Amino acid sequence: MENSGEGLPGGEIDFGEIYEDIYGSFDYNQGMEIDPDRTALVVVDMQPGLTSPKVGMGKAYSQLLKISTDYFDNRVQNVAIPNIGRLLDFFRRQDMMVVYIVTWSETDDLSDMPDYQKRAIRRWEAVYGEQLYRKWTEGSNVWEQIAPREHELVLPKRTASAFASSMLPFCLQNAGIKTVVLTGCNTNGCVFETAVVGRNVGYEFILVSDATACFAPVLQNQAEVWMARHFALVRTTEETITLLKSEEGKQ
């Protein structure tokens, strides 16, 4: 986990140590059972319109945020996308379930969005000068490097959590999935909220730390530590693949 928070206050804070001082040591993996046949890879919001400083919300972020988006852009392009690609290769070779979550509105007036989302989108649009978050706007499709294949699920959501506002719970339940390998953006936003709601309705999670991204290292660190405390087993891409291979060998 990264402890440097360049560009934000509190960059040197070790959240893991703080939480352990308060709550004591904790091993999320204790008693956790993983069946690769009941495990799915979920890729959250990996759309240029949400993650690139050149288009859509990413461009609006670059104008609105008080910090540079260079760290986020670099992490998306050089860390998250390559590692999501590795996970996709593994899951596809093993014929395991892959699900993409995208965020967009399918209406011109945002009537399919909750009020808090409408207010935020309209505020961002005032800065950007164009429509954002619509299915038809530039950058809505998943990054080409990790694009879904024809037979893979692409599920739109309207809120931060895919378990709250998409068909993800229905699809996972029908497929008999129990464990979700979680990747995408933002680690402390939609990825986090997807795990929070999903954990509370009975799913187990593996958060892939180097297949996720957010706006600053301090936020990434805090999200990983809090997830590890309460909602997910936090592992790197290599560790996740090794874990799934070892569990497969036990079947």
Image: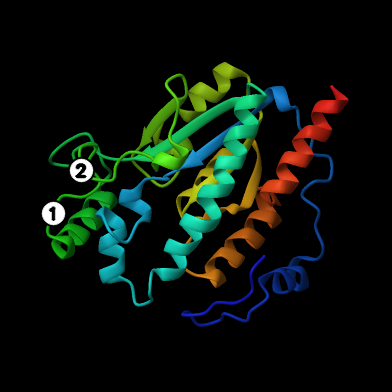
Residue 117 picture location, percent across and down: 28, 50
Side of 132 relative to 37 (left or right): left
Q: Are marks 1 and 2 in contact (CB under 8 Å)?
A: yes
Q: Is residue 35 left or right of residue 174?
A: right
Give the secondary structure at mark 1. loop
Residue with the mark numbered 1:
130
**Circle nearer the N terminus (1, 2):** 1
Q: Residue at x 67, y 65 (%)?
A: 1
Res. 13 in view = yes
Amino acid identity at mark 1: Glu
Give, as a three-letter code, the residue at label 2: Thr
* Residue 231 horizontal/vertical position (percent): 65, 48
Which residue appears at 58% of the width and 61% of the height?
Answer: 223
Residue 226 placement: quadrant: bottom right
**Relative to 225, 166 lies left or right:** left
Q: Nearer the viewer, residue 15 or 75?
A: 75
| Closest to the observer, 4 or 242 | 242
Expressed as whole percent of the image width and height from the top left, the position of residue 143 reads 39, 43
Task: Name the element at disc 2.
Answer: loop
Q: Which residue is mark 2?
A: 137
- Can you say whether 122 is above or below 176 in the image? below
Distance of label 1 from label 2 (alpha carbons): 9 Å
Coordinates of residue 188 in the picture (x, y in percent): 51, 58
